[in-house]
Amino acid sequence: KNEVEQSPQNLTAQEGEFITINCSYSVGISALHWLQQHPGGGIVSLFMLSSGKKKHGRLIATINIQEKHSSLHITASHPRDSAVYICASGSGSARQLTFGSGTQLTVLP
Amino acid sequence: DTEVTQTPKHLVMGMTNKKSLKCEQHMGHRAMYWYKQKAKKPPELMFVYSYEKLSINESVPSRFSPECPNSSLLNLHLHALQPEDSALYLCASSQSGLVRTGELFFGEGSRLTVL
């Protein structure tokens, strides 16, 4: 059974700081998703990756398949980045994604 | 159009009411999903439709009844719900129904309160 663990659970940063959120999973996967959820509910897919690194604006996601670990980095953080960040993994044999418990990020001005 | 549209955004219903949640996407995606999310918890999968056919039912009580009238529409019919069913209900879609290849597009959710 795949288990996904995220750390930290809560993170408070000052505006402009570099932020890292970590995600570890227990079984080999086909894809790792990073999702963002703002208060009020809607979820936005930030990245889906199966190897290497992806970058979109100030967001960077990396994955190390051998170590079963992924990180989400936010450069030059801004208060509008405050949200819950969720990683979710999908393995070839699984019928659905396995979600981490989420990281609540608060960026203070 | 990369949106998944859910209506209504908020719904309050009594335990004897019958109501429906609606989800719509026009991205040509062939898989559509219903998730339930309680406060401070990750989403829990309820149902998956693939090519308009129900492919996954995660042992959801029959008081929740999904329907996929066509490839763009997904409904969730609600009847005789319990207060513990109060939650955020999220719809999502993906190009394919394969978790290893399908990037998910989520709607804003319908926040349901059962009195």
Image (cartoon, grey):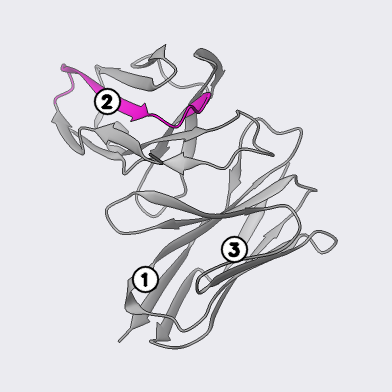
Mark 3 belongs to chain: A
Q: Amino acid at mark 1?
A: Ser
User: A56 above or below B102?
Assistant: below
Residue behind mark 3: A6
Residue behind mark 1: A82
Q: Determine if the magenta segment contains residue B15.
A: yes
Please indicate whether residue A45 sits to the left or right of residue A26 in the image: left
Hey, which quadrant is residue B21 in on the image? Answer: top left
Say what secondary structure mark 2 lies in.
strand
Please indicate whether residue B23 sits to the left or right of residue A61 in the image: left
Q: Which percent across, then down, holds residue B107?
A: 36, 40
Q: Which percent across, then down, holds residue A92?
A: 76, 36
Q: Amino acid at mark 2?
A: Leu
Q: Which percent across, then down, holds residue B4?
A: 36, 37
Q: Which of the image's four quarters has the N terminus of chain B? A: top left
Q: Which residues are magenta?
A: B14-32
Say what secondary structure mark 1 lies in.
loop
Q: Is residue B115 visible?
A: no
Q: Nearer the viewer, residue A16 or B66?
A: A16
Residue B21: assigned label: 2
Residue drawn where x is 45% and y is 22% of the image: B60
Find out whether the residues at labels 1 and 2 contact each other: C-beta distance under 8 Å. no
Q: Report the residue that reaches farthest toward the front.
A: B1
Crowd band around label 1 with a 10 angstrom C-alpha radius: few (<14), some (14–19), many (20+): many
User: B29 above or below B99?
Assistant: above
